[in-house]
Image: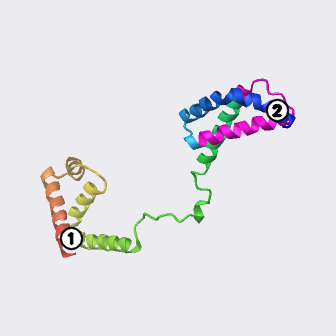
Amino acid sequence: MSASLRGIVPIMRGLTNQLRRLQKLLQRRGASPEDAEDLVQEAVVRLFTYTRKSVEVRNPEAFLTRTALNLAVDLHRSTRRHQFETDSVETLGLLDIGPTPDELLAAEQRLLAMRHALDQVSRRTRDVFFMHRLQGFSHAEIAAKLGVTKSAVEKHIASALTILAIERQRE
């Protein structure tokens, strides 16, 4: 048996219980049982490597614990790094959730049909309808601006909506 192995064997005999505790500690901190076992083994290999280089490890238990915890942090960081896409946005095949050309054409045709339908009503009815629907004015606000009754505003809006409903049924 080589001199470096003779130095590590007594250390390892005394550490068996600590190695089990260290595995459980790593598992409590989120490592899988397999990862915890691998991390403890890697920490033991590093302890062996240090002692083989004739470096004195004064507290092997503390060395193993700190090394295993550091390795667990490194493992966690590397797995998180792989959760994100590394390719540029331009090369990714992203899903376009915007309207298709057919949908855009259909919407444009509906707007043109509405425009033609609203061309059939009087200018006042069209203005009242746009003030209400596009600009968000209430019936009372429109009546005050135009100097008409609230009832007249309601009739203009009802007239425009009737024309639009008829146009919609034609589609």
Task: Please give the residue where the numbered disc 2 appears in the rendered image.
Answer: 6
Asked if residue 119 lies left or right of residue 20, the reply is: left
Which corner quadrant holds the N terminus?
top right
Residue 143 versus residue 23 in the image, above or below: below
Total tally of numbered discs in the picture: 2
Quadrant (top left/top right/bottom left/bottom right) for the C terminus:
bottom left
Image quadrant in which you'd find residue 28: top right
Residue 26 % position (x, y): 59, 34
In this image, 47 relative to 143: left or right?
Answer: right
- Asked if 60 appears above or below 86 in the picture, the reply is above
As helix, strand or loop, the secondary structure at mark 1 comes to: helix
**Left or right of 65 on screen, residue 164:** left
Give the residue at mark 1.
168
Find numbered disc 2 in the image and state the secondary structure of the residue it sits on: helix
**Is 68 left or right of 3, judged from the image as shown?**
left
- Residue type, label 2: Arg
Q: Nearer the viewer, mark 1 or mark 2?
A: 2
* Dominant secondary structure, magenta: helix
Q: Which amino acid type is marked by label 1? A: Arg
- In the image, residue 52 lies in the stretch drawn in magenta: yes
- 74 or 125: which is nearer to us? 74
* N-terminal label among 1 and 2: 2
Point out residue 133 in the picture as x, y percentages from the top left corner.
Answer: 27, 56
Q: Foreground residue, 87 or 163?
A: 87
As displayed, is residue 8 above or below residue 159? Answer: above
Q: Residues within 10 Å of mark 2 (few under 14, many from 20)?
A: few
Where does the magenta region start and end? Answer: 35-63
Give the residue displayed 15% in from the left and 60% down from the top. Answer: 158
Q: Quadrant of residue 166?
A: bottom left
92 to 148, vertically: above or below: below
